[in-house]
Amino acid sequence: MYEFITQGGIVMYILLAISIIAMAIVFERSWSLRRSTVIPIKYIAKIEAAVKANDVNEAMTLCSNKSTAMSRIIWVALQKRGVRRSVLKEVLEETGRQEIANLERFIAVLGVIAAISPLLGLLGTVIGMIEVFRVISIEGVGKADVLAGGISIALNTTAAGLSVAIPSLVAYRFFESRVDGFVIEIEHQALHFVDLLRGELE
């Protein structure tokens, strides 16, 4: 493995570095995008029950005790209760945009890694092939084993680039889809609480 990396030169080290970054993002987003940290349904049901019981203080305390995207949005809705419905919706939309930005954090980086990894691999291969042709100009084409070995080494970076790009692309699409699903659910829950609080209509 060490020889495989060193043969690829500086491009291989760059690919190794961005693969570590990609892995770190995958682990971090997997932890941060759990349902229990975004939209904990059972906990939201407790908040809803408190609101229906007209115990707004208890509902706000429940929101403060569990820091999730949904509980923070509901807390804002409770804090702004009594304002016109249209105003309340605008406030929640702004809060929702901030929470969605937090959910999407680092995901775009995975997309960039998926896009540039094959290009870096190709760059490494081109550099390697240039070296192969340099050897040909000196040694001639009589040593097939030397040429085959050089070409094999040159192709290592392409293989490495694809090995980084494919999992990164899969993770990027997965997290993107997961966030989209959460966004739809957050909007639904927010509108539900807007109606539940019965803000003053225009």
Image (tube, rainbow, N blue to C red):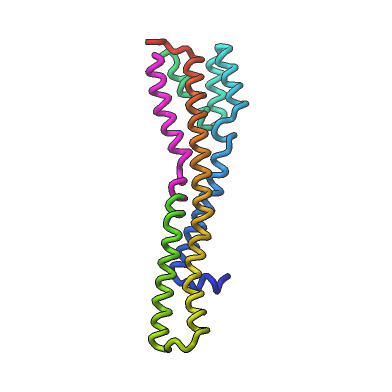
Judging depth in this view, the residue of 91 and 59 nearest the camera is: 91
Q: Main secondary structure of the magenta part?
A: helix
Please report the residue visible at 50 percent of the width from the left and 74 percent of the height from the top. 153
Question: From the viewer's perspective, is 84 left or right of 21?
Answer: left
From what the image shows, is residue 73 above or below residue 165? above
Position of the C terminus, as image quadrant, is top left
The magenta region covers 84-110
Image location of residue 12, percent across then percent down: 47, 67
41, 51: nearer the viewer = 41
| Front residue of 45 and 147 | 147
Give the image location of residue 134, x and y in percent. 39, 82
Q: Residue at x 53, y 16 (%)?
A: 56
The residue at the point 50 percent across, 84 percent down is 146
Q: Is residue 11 above or below residue 49?
A: below
Q: Is residue 147 one of those drawn in magenta?
A: no
- The residue sitting at 58% across, 35% down in the picture is 35
Residue 198 image position (x, y, % from top left)? 47, 12
Q: Position of residue 165 (x, y in %)?
A: 49, 56
Q: Residue furthest right?
A: 42
The N terminus - image quarter = bottom right
In the picture, residue 82 is in which quadrant?
Answer: top left
